[in-house]
Image (spheres, grey):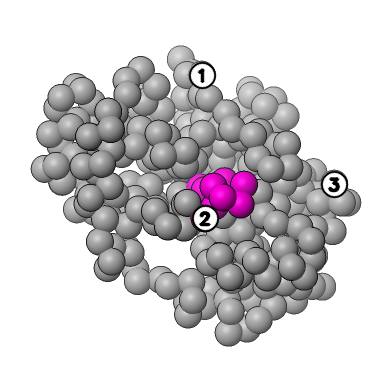
């Protein structure tokens, strides 16, 4: 049984489901089975990356699925070591070959790597790849407002999405507000904070009990009501379906505020500050 998932329209007209499936560390045969199961459960947005080394795994799960390719939205990401223009173009092509796809629905620059100062070159490569039909929509991950402003200033094109770390312990309120003001969609990686202490939160647990839902469902509903696309990951078919079952209840303003108050300055999972962090 699959569920109907609402969609959002990006600033370039491309539509995406409001919740997708993360594939980090889902590799090989087990990864194919998990992703295939997720598609069967109803996920239509699948998120991978060059550096996850599982674009082939995602492609095989798509091949085994009975869901038509055009009904799926597949995301991948450019690694930092390939941010110069020519290397970026080649990496995009390689991403497609790995997954055995003709195009990606969404392709992102994984991190800005500001010390290397090649992210504008990389962005131009994504712009051109979109013109060539290799990508439907282009965006970024972990970019700060000053990085995005530079992209638009130097190329005239702004991202459709910025995928950032976002969860109850680090809710990125100011960044999300900035995105809304500039018509850029926020997408959250690790929306469940990689199952750390947030899933033991007594505060969220009380809200979950009041709605007869799990803590994960409350957190994912919180993302949805914030207007944030989330991409939770699970290998369990039961939890995959559970994570999609968030559209039959609503959190009230008090509950939303209570969850928002859990954020903290040191809430990042791995202290990866985009102003200084370098990913290759």
- Number of other residues with Cα within 10 Å of mark 2, as a class: few under 14, some 14 to 19, many 20 or more: some
The numbered disc on residue 72 is none
Is residue 130 rendered to the left or right of residue 77?
A: right
Magenta-span inclusion, residue 97? no
Q: Position of residue 140 (x, y in %)?
A: 61, 59
What is the CA distance from the residue labelled 3 to the residue labelled 1?
Answer: 28 Å
Instruction: For the C terminus, give its image quadrant.
Output: bottom right
What is the CA distance from the residue labelled 1 to the residue labelled 2?
Answer: 30 Å
As helix, strand or loop, the secondary structure at mark 3 comes to: loop
Q: Which residues fall within the magenta stretch?
A: 178-187
Q: Is residue 177 visible?
A: yes
As helix, strand or loop, the secondary structure at mark 1 comes to: loop
Q: Earlier in the sequence, mark 3 or mark 1?
A: 1
Residue nearest the viewer, comparing 3 with 112: 112
Q: Position of residue 221 (x, y in %)?
A: 35, 32
Q: Position of residue 110 (x, y in %)?
A: 58, 63
- Number of other residues with Cα within 10 Å of mark 1, as a class: few under 14, some 14 to 19, many 20 or more: few
Q: Is residue 53 visible?
A: no
Badge 1 is on which residue? 4
Q: Residue at x 46, y 15 (%)?
A: 1
Residue nearest the viewer, comparing 171 with 36: 171
Q: Quadrant of residue 74?
A: top right
What is the CA distance from the residue labelled 2 to the residue labelled 3?
Answer: 29 Å
In this rendering, the answer to whether 174 lies above or below 119 is above
Q: Residue at x 75, y 76 (%)?
A: 84
Q: Position of residue 151 (x, y in %)?
A: 70, 66
The numbered disc on residue 178 is 2
Check whether the beta carbons of the residues at disc 3 and disc 1 lie within 8 A of each other: no
Residue nearest the viewer, comparing 113 with 104: 113
Is residue 257 rendered to the left or right of residue 153?
A: left
Badge 3 is on which residue? 133
Q: Earlier in the sequence, mark 1 or mark 2?
A: 1
């Amino acid at each position: 049984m699959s569920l109907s998932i609402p969609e959002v329209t990006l600033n370039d007209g491309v539509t995406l489901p409001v919740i997708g499936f993360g594939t980090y560390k889902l590799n090989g045969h087990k990864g194919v089975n998990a992703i295939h199961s997720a598609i069967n459960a109803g996920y239509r947005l699948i998120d991978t990356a060059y550096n996850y080394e599982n674009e082939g795994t995602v492609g095989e799960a798509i091949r085994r699925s009975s869901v038509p390719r055009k009904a799926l939205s597949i995301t991948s990401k450019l690694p930092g070591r390939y941010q110069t223009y020519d290397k970026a173009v080649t990496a995009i092509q390689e991403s497609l070959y790995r997954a055995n796809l003709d195009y990606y629905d969404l392709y992102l620059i994984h991190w800005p790597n500001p010390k290397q100062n090649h992210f504008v070159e990389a962005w131009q490569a994504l712009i051109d790849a979109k013109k060539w039909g290799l990508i439907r929509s282009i965006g970024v991950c972990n970019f700060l407002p000053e990085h995005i402003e530079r992209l638009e200033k130097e190329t005239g094109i702004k991202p459709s999405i910025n995928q950032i770390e976002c969860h109850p312990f680090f809710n990125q309120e100011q960044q999300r507000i900035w995105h809304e003001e500039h018509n850029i969609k926020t997408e959250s990686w690790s929306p469940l904070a990689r199952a750390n202490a947030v899933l033991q939160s007594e505060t969220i647990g009380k809200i979950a009990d009041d709605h007869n839902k799990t803590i994960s469902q409350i957190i994912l509903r919180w993302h949805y009501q914030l207007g944030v696309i989330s991409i939770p990951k699970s290998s369990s078919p039961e939890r995959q379906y559970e994570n999609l079952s968030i559209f039959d209840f609503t959190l009230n303003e008090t509950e939303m505020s209570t969850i928002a108050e859990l954020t903290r300055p040191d809430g990042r999972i791995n202290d990866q500050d985009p102003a200084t962090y370098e990913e290759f």
